[in-house]
Amino acid sequence: MMMSLVILSVVGLGAYAIIIGVTSSQKKLEQTLERGFNSFSYKRRNIPLQPLRIGMMNRLGWMRVASPHAMVNGVLQGDLVNREFGLSIVSDDARLEEPIWIKCEGDKDVKAECQPFTKGQSMLRITLGERARGFAIVRIQAEWPGLPSNHPYKRSPEYTYTIPLARDCEFMSQTPGAPKFLLHNGSWTENGPPKESGCIPTFKTYHCIDGNLKESAGERFCP
């Protein structure tokens, strides 16, 4: 009887030890798995398929700059000096985040201002200085701010926009009804007082070429 009790006790202790060992191992396994899952970082997809491309929606072939005195009946004739252009970001992959401007600058006497992107679109405002002549040159570049600095598609190429400028000419005339300014490539003929014979009136022709007023004199025979 005593021997049976001893054997049963030994078997019970062994079973208890096995149960404790299995429970401890299970607990360690669960802790390890929990630490492993907690170490994962579920980040959003940020691998674009190609670099950013910037496209201008309403690009003009040339920009007309009205004379400061281009007023007729209190209304400014022609286009304003400051022009706004719409820019859009184009990318084949799903949108990750709004890009940001890292370069938005104009050439000498040209001021460029890029507005923050909203739904992939931005506005570029160009302000011309008084000495701006020939061309308005603007350089722009954008990037995905969330991509690593060494990512090959983090930034767009640098784009350069060159817009030809055409300035109107100020025109001061003594002739009633004459314009106060001349359009780019415009001309105006002003008749002078007739000669004593009354048959050959004199006249002057004014021609505007990109802000420079040229004057030429001539005579016209009366019919």
Image (cartoon, rainbow, N blue to C red):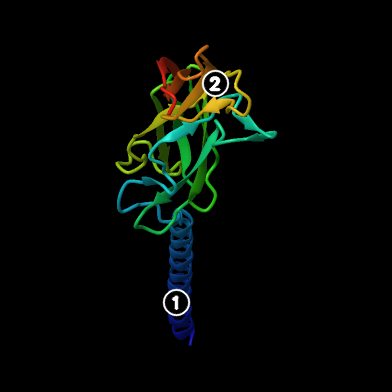
Res 62 label = none
Q: Position of residue 188 (x, y in %)?
A: 48, 26
> How many angstroms separate mark 1 from mark 2 (CA)?
108 Å
Q: Which residue does the image show at 40% across and 16% down from the upper left?
A: 218
Q: Position of residue 125 (x, y in %)?
A: 53, 35
Q: Nearer the viewer, residue 134 or 49?
A: 134
Query: Which residue, as the protein is rendered here, is positioned at the far front?
Result: 197
Q: Which residue does the image show at 46% across and 57% down from the upper left?
A: 42
Q: Which residue is mark 1?
A: 15
The C terminus: image quadrant: top left
Residue type at tag 2: Glu
Name the secondary structure under disc 2.
Answer: strand
Tell me, yes or no, if residue 170 can be seen here.
Answer: yes
State which tag comes first along the sequence, 1 or 2: 1
Q: Position of residue 132 (x, y in %)?
A: 46, 20
Q: Position of residue 66 (x, y in %)?
A: 53, 29
Within the image, what quadrant is residue 137 found in? top left
Q: Nearer the viewer, mark 1 or mark 2?
A: 2
Res 170 label = 2
Q: Nearer the viewer, residue 196 or 80?
A: 196
Name the secondary structure under disc 1.
Answer: helix
| Crowding near the residue tagged with mark 2, few <14, some 14–19, many ≥20 C-alpha atoms within 10 Å | many
Tell me, yes or no, if residue 129 can be seen here.
Answer: no
Left or right of 92, for residue 222: right
Q: Nearer the viewer, residue 98 or 126?
A: 126
Left or right of 110, for residue 77: right
Residue type at tag 1: Ala
